[in-house]
Amino acid sequence: MTSNATHDDLAPIRESVRGLCVNFPGEYWRRLDRERAYPEEFVAALTKAGFLAALIPEEYGGSGLTMTAAAAIMEEIQASGCNGAACHAQMYTMGTLLQHGGTEQKKRYLPAIARGELRLQAFGVTEPTSGTDTLSLRTTAVRDGDHYVVNGQKIWTSRAEHSDLMLLLARTTPREQAQSRTAGLTVFLVDMRTAKNKGLTIRPIRTMMNHATTEVFFENLRVPAEAVIGKEGEGFRYILSGMNAERILIAAECIGDAKWFIQKATAYAGERVVFGRPIGQNQGVQFPIARAYIGMRAAELMVREAAALYEAGRDCGAEANMAKHLAAEASWAAADMCVQTHGGFGFAEEFDIERKFRETRLYTVAPISTNLVLSYIAEHVLGLPRSY
Ligand SMILES: Cc1cc2nc3c(=O)[nH]c(=O)nc-3n(C[C@H](O)[C@H](O)[C@H](O)COP(=O)(O)OP(=O)(O)OC[C@H]3O[C@@H](n4cnc5c(N)ncnc54)[C@H](O)[C@@H]3O)c2cc1C
């Protein structure tokens, strides 16, 4: 694909990610997909190369890279046909610890995460009954001496079985007693290694793609008070501030997916001969590919804008949401186009298209669904009345 889209000063990082991903070709992902197995070797290789510690500052043993660089890493993983969903959470959940954690917590956890000795891949926010309405979550953490006792349930806690730590959002003050609508929720850094079988139970959920997602049950789980990140009751604000990073990084993954689909479709359209000529000679085949490319490039600009604002420390809520929305729509449109361009072969496992198609479908729903992005823009950018 001829494009200036990757001609930035991050070329060495991009090349290095691509060099690593070459060792994890389609057969690797197909086998894991069939077995619904976790890509241990891939995640270990990314960790060893330091890519998952991109956003951890150098003083804590990370690479101290910018959000733009981190986004480039995630994009290249997807554009190489791999799946960063197996490990992307480490990059953004770590931000909550970095920005709001105490000095002792940071010293204790960040260097170990950077070295790959500890995995922080689990993010426990969503619950079965609250859905997108995070403020109505029901998991409680009640203070008992120098511990909190946690009861409740999370759902879609991805990678919980492959993580040592979980960032958990729980209610510490009953909603009716909280000082404001958003107060009373607290973030905990739960050490799952000690919690398993002592009040923490993880059950895998099988999904349409290989995502290692789970539901997690808390039954009188005792969590030490020093596991609280920042101030008790302020957790919703901390989680919200981390969500911009999550949206930007996942948007970058969608850009990578879109590039992969466009590259596959372009190559196939050039070589597949039907009625005595390459199918790509027909405008009916060319135009959807060109349209997908335009959509991807436009979304990519918004991802860059959001990342630049983020790293300049400026408010990027609108841009992060718009980037995630545009990129998720662009990758899904490219996925659909790629299947259509391949005709029947788009459905064959060995082409990897149907797998990537299933994988990229997630991102108009999670980590935030399209309607909720639109509501955010309507309310916070356009000043329209809050709809929920
Ligand atoms: C594979 C997978 C992995 C995930 N990983 C994680 C994870 O690691 N950690 C975590 O905490 N969560 C995770 N999630 C949860 C994900 O963030 C939620 O699924 C997503 O935010 C949507 O919430 P919901 O499923 O509860 O949908 P709901 O909130 O029940 O919404 C259902 C539909 O209704 C629409 N809707 C709801 N309210 C409104 C409204 N007021 N106006 C208009 N439309 C509305 C939504 O847009 C959506 O389309 C994951 C989800 C999946 C499927």
Image: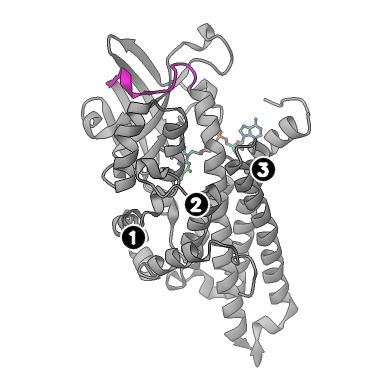
Sequence-wise, the earlier of marks 1 and 2 is: 1
> Quick check: is the Cβ at mark 3 less than 8 Å away from ligand 1?
no
Q: Disc 3, disc 1: CB below 8 Å?
A: no
- Measuring from the top left, give residue 77's x and y in whole percent: 46, 60
Gap in angstroms between the C-alphas marked 2 and 3: 17 Å
Q: Which residue is mark 1?
A: 32
Q: Which residue is mark 3?
A: 319
Q: Nearer the viewer, residue 190 or 28?
A: 190
Q: Which residue is mark 2?
A: 70
Please, what secondary structure does the residue beneath circle 1 have? helix
Q: Residue furthest bottom?
A: 276
Please, what secondary structure does the residue beneath circle 3 have? helix
- Measuring from the top left, give residue 342's x and y in whole percent: 57, 74
Q: Nearer the viewer, residue 49 or 194?
A: 49
Which residue type does callout 2 highlight?
Ala
Exactly how many numbered labels are in the figure?
3
Sequence-wise, the earlier of marks 2 and 3 is: 2
Q: Nearer the viewer, mark 1 or mark 2?
A: 2
